[in-house]
Image: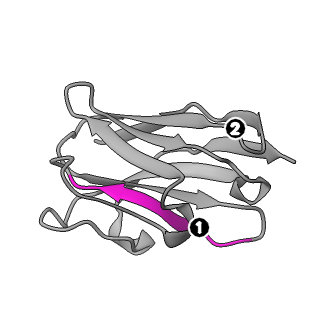
């Protein structure tokens, strides 16, 4: 049984930074991603990282501002968010992909395991 637990969300002013963490238990070496969901919107891809940590991808609107990384010794994936904007306000979820080991995927439906989410609020 895989469990994912996010932390690090909170309230921050526009232009500020936050670092989210996702601790995984039960399974560690698989591709993982971050998604977010704002009120009234669909859950969207943010970033993903291969189980080796050597390959990453991010949504175009977040490239240059958000960085995904992982520490497999701690079974933890991180999302460093800089230059935050009010439109980044959302619940952020981490997710695990049990199937695609050779490549990372941006599709929400490809992810099998989900955390409970952590709220990020960016004030203007």
In the image, residue 88 above or below residue 110: above
Give the left or right position of residue 47, taking residue 28 as reference.
right
Q: Position of residue 42 (x, y in %)?
A: 64, 72
Quadrant position of residue 29: top left
Image quarter where the N terminus lies is: top left
Look at the numbered disc 1 and give the secondary structure of its residue: loop
Query: Around disc 2, counting alpha carbons within 10 Å, would you say few (fewer than 14), some (14 to 19), or many (20 or more)?
Result: some
Query: Around disc 1, counting alpha carbons within 10 Å, would you say few (fewer than 14), some (14 to 19), or many (20 or more)?
Result: some
Q: Which residues are magenta?
A: 41-50
Residue at 58% x, 31% y is 8
Q: Position of residue 86 (x, y in %)?
A: 79, 54
Q: Position of residue 60 (x, y in %)?
A: 50, 71
Dot in front, 2 or 1: 2
Q: Which residue is mark 2?
A: 16
Residue at 76% x, 44% y is 121
Give the left or right position of residue 111, taking residue 16 as reference.
left
In the image, residue 52 above or below residue 56: above
Q: Which residue is mark 1?
A: 43
Viewer-proximal residue among 54 and 29: 54
Is residue 47 located in the magenta-colored stretch of the structure?
A: yes
Residue at 41% x, 38% y is 78
């Amino acid at each position: 049984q895989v469990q994912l637990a996010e932390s690090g969300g909170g309230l921050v002013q526009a232009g500020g930074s936050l670092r989210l963490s996702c601790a995984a238990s039960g399974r560690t070496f698989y591709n993982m991603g971050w998604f977010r969901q704002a009120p009234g919107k669909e859950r969207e891809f943010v970033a993903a990282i291969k189980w080796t940590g050597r390959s990453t991808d991010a949504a175009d609107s977040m490239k240059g501002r958000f960085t995904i990384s992982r520490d497999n010794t701690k079974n933890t994936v991180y999302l460093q968010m800089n230059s935050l904007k009010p439109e980044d306000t959302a619940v952020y979820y981490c997710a695990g992909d049990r199937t695609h080991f050779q490549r990372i995927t941006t599709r929400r439906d490809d992810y099998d395991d989900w955390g409970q989410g952590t709220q990020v609020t960016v004030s203007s």
